[in-house]
Amino acid sequence: MLAADIRARFLAYFAKNGHAVRPSSALVPADDPTLLFTNAGMVQFKKVFLGMEEAPDGKRRATTSQKCVRAGGKHNDLEQVGHTARHHTFFEMLGNFSFGDYFKREAIRFAWEFVTEDLKIPREHLRVTVFHEDDEARQLWKEEAGLPDNRIYGLGAKDNFWQMADTGPCGPCTEIYVDLAKMAADWAFPADASGEWTNTDLVEYSLDAFVEVAEAGRFLEIWNLVFMQFDRQPDGTLVPLPQPSVDTGAGLERIAAVMQGVTNNFHTDGFRPLITKVEEIVGIKYPYRPGVGLGKAHDASGKEIDQASFRVLADHARAVGFLLADGVFPSNDGRGYVLRRILRRAVRHAWLLGRREPTLVHVVETLIESMRDTYPELHVRRKHILETTRAEEERFLATIDAGMTRFEEMAPESSTQGSSRLRGTISGEDAFRRYDTFGFPIDLTELMARERGYLVDISGFEQALAAQRKQSQEERKSKQLTVSADDFADPTQWTHDQQHAEALGRFVGYEVIEVDSVVTAVRQLTDGRVAVMLRETPFYAESGGQVSDQGEIRGDGWSVSVTEVRKMDGRIAAIGTATAEVTFGRAHASVPRERRNDTERHHTATHLLHAALRKVLGEHVHQAGSLVAPDRLRFDFTHHGPVTAEQLAAIEADVNAGVWASAPVTIQEESYTDAVARGAMALFGEKYGDVVRVVEIPRLSVELCGGTHVRNTSEIGLVRIVSESGVAAGVRRIEAVAGPRAFHFMADRERALLQVAARLKVPMSGMTSGGEQIEKKLDGLLDERKQLEKRLEEAMRGGAQGGGLAQQLAAKANDVAGTRLVASRVAVPDAKALQALGDAVREALGSGVAVLGAALADGKGALLAVATEDVRERGLRADAIVREVAATVGGRGGGKPHMAQAGVEVAQLDSALAAAGEIVSRLADAK
């Protein structure tokens, strides 16, 4: 039975039994900042189980096939993936859920009925476990399934008691096991196996033998039923829940292995196409024979290779494809870092199979084709998934060779250090160098080290990393671009007004740009500036990409021109140049209205731009950095490849449509979970508090943001995109201007266009832009230029009559040390024409050297040297000749042996050409 059939049967069975079939939630939890990834079916229902929300649509029964990733946090077994039969980064969890509806009896009945009747797994091959204190569950298995006591095993809390945290919902669980020795055609006992559990004829096994069998993999757990029965109190007391619930999870890959008669999940239909693709790419057969098991893998030379690499690539292709489809992007922190680790581990295993070019991308492509019907998001985001995977592979492959060579030196397979189990320790300095120079995440170095029996000095690595960060901080300090955060936070350097020592410096800039306040603290800075803290301040401190406000603080007999604003332990300090000593007491602080308005326009325009990018390019687009200033905005975002002119036009049009919609910009504070649940954009890796500030433009944008914004999008007026470029692998940048800045930008462009039109004598009046006429006139001029260049080239080469300039120059060649030499000044408009003439002269000479000089139309002087093939073979090279000729008049140049060019002053051309004969003679004699 194929995995797709199992999934469909499961959902259909529970739908038939009154369960609402819910779609899989995304791998990035929408409302749970405590999780990196969705790692179980119950995650999307967590609030329902906690009593914080009602059941979806009021239906108290649900069933799902949930996408899951376990590759970070406490669920991090990445080094095991590929080396065991059932560890995966990505997997599917089948589940049925009761939100205060049915409980143990129905859950047990449903599970038993599905396993034995729908899947038709023989009852005699099944066993179950229960929590050893849960007599109710044991009795229900007897009643509902007819299981005898000797096939129901009571285990402790470690195995069969579930809890979400130290306090809160918890309860016993029960699990269903299948005997693989009876179900899998390729089952084989380990060579050294012995004891009761190896006897397949036994009907009854002792508890100890059952535990041993389960650990050895013969009895395979396929389904876990969790009974949320209690509320654990801080003192450990278990209080019965008023509405007990059920949360179950059945691993699709495990059930597929049972139904397809194999012991290893990687040999099921969910992985076979991926492993086949790996075989095809690397040209090595995966050594599995159905019904027999695994053998050994060898490359073309007969060398044995690690078969785990096939499985790693198959597994990681699934994780990479689905994570990219759900909006995770490779980066150096958070979820993106986990994705990058998975990608780079896959690249490393492809490298071990002999590949030195992108490999995983082809396996991911096979994944998309094989699972697109079940998960259409894979097909919808296919281009993004494949482009990102390829780019990441290429990026790592650029350094992996050197990094792997260095690893071989650090951790050789054969070592005299220690025993065969633990061969030695990789120093923290070496691990850091591998990270810093070759891009190997420390986690990957740890994984590789473990595989060879080495430890890594993590403490030493962290010290080296900290030292580098400290050095970077000191370098930034030495540049004195701004005030060091560390120095700025030193309270001993501040003078405080004791009357207002506890004032927090409340920011009131969201509401007003001028305020009467009180100076609470002052500090003189080493660069001559002063830092001032106020009880209330209108000055915005740089954060979230928005630059600091500027402005003025006026006190009794003094004023400060504010040029920088910083935060210190939540307090805001304004920094600037003072006209006199700043004293405590009353002061008036103000931000220029025009500057703040321009900043607000650019910040709200940034939100509209983010939304437009996701609409036009796709939901893979996420913010990767930004700058919001009074004069412009800059937005970095995740996307592979340039944005086309058509896409850029659509993005700009969409942004301006939002501006002209005169949409209100609403700002409110709410809980983080509520904000994200209703679609607010949160930056990956950004830390947010429990309460966040939500900036919403109805039907256009919802983002978590602490910046200042316009009240209505119409205040922006206009947005113009100025440029689009690439700044890093997979990261693009758009720069734009808004409001008056956009008007001035367009006015400058219009003035330039009017000047061009005037020079071309194209009328620009009325409602017409004149663009078509200018384009038509320019096309005509360009065509005319091409024709003239063609005629000039023909003339220089001699044309049909053979009397061209090139022949004329060649005819005047002099013999210098047995070499024909042309040294002449010529009249050409530009460097391109000079090069064309040089080619023609070389051809006309047949054998020899030419040095040509010209005063170009741009006012610059140029020398060009050419040499025919036969004289080059004698050692007379054009690059050497032009370099020495130019040097006689203080010029410099270079090029290739057959043609080279130099720049000299126009007034020095004749002198340089006069020296050509002597230089060619000397160079010829030297050869």
Image (cartoon, rainbow, N blue to C red):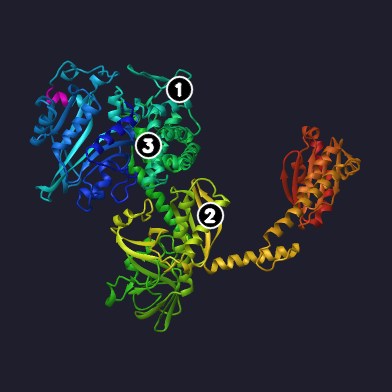
**Residue 225, horizontal then vertical, whole percent:** 19, 37
Residue at the spot 29% in from the left edge and 72% down from the top edge:
503
Above or below, 924 relative to 785: above
Q: Amino acid at mark 2?
A: Ala
Q: Position of residue 314 (x, y in %)?
A: 39, 31
In space, the residues marked 1 and 2 are separated at their CA atoms by 47 Å
Residue 129 image offset from top left, x and y in percent: 15, 31
Q: Magenta part mainly helix, strand or loop?
A: helix
Circle 1/circle 2 CB separation < 8 Å: no
Range of magenta residues: 205-210
Q: Quadrant of the N terminus?
A: top left
Q: Is residue 63 magenta?
A: no
Residue 920 picture quarter: top right
Q: Residues within 10 Å of mark 1 (few under 14, many from 20)?
A: some
Going by the image, does 878 lie left or right of 119?
right
Percent position of residue 906, x then y: 80, 56
Q: What residue is disc 2 on?
A: 650
Residue nearest the observer in this picture, 512 or 660: 660
- Do the residues under discs 3 and 2 have CB atoms within 8 angstroms? no
Which element type, helix, strand or loop, lies under badge 2? helix
Q: Which residue is mark 3?
A: 374
Location of residue 626 with respect to 122 vertically, above or below:
below
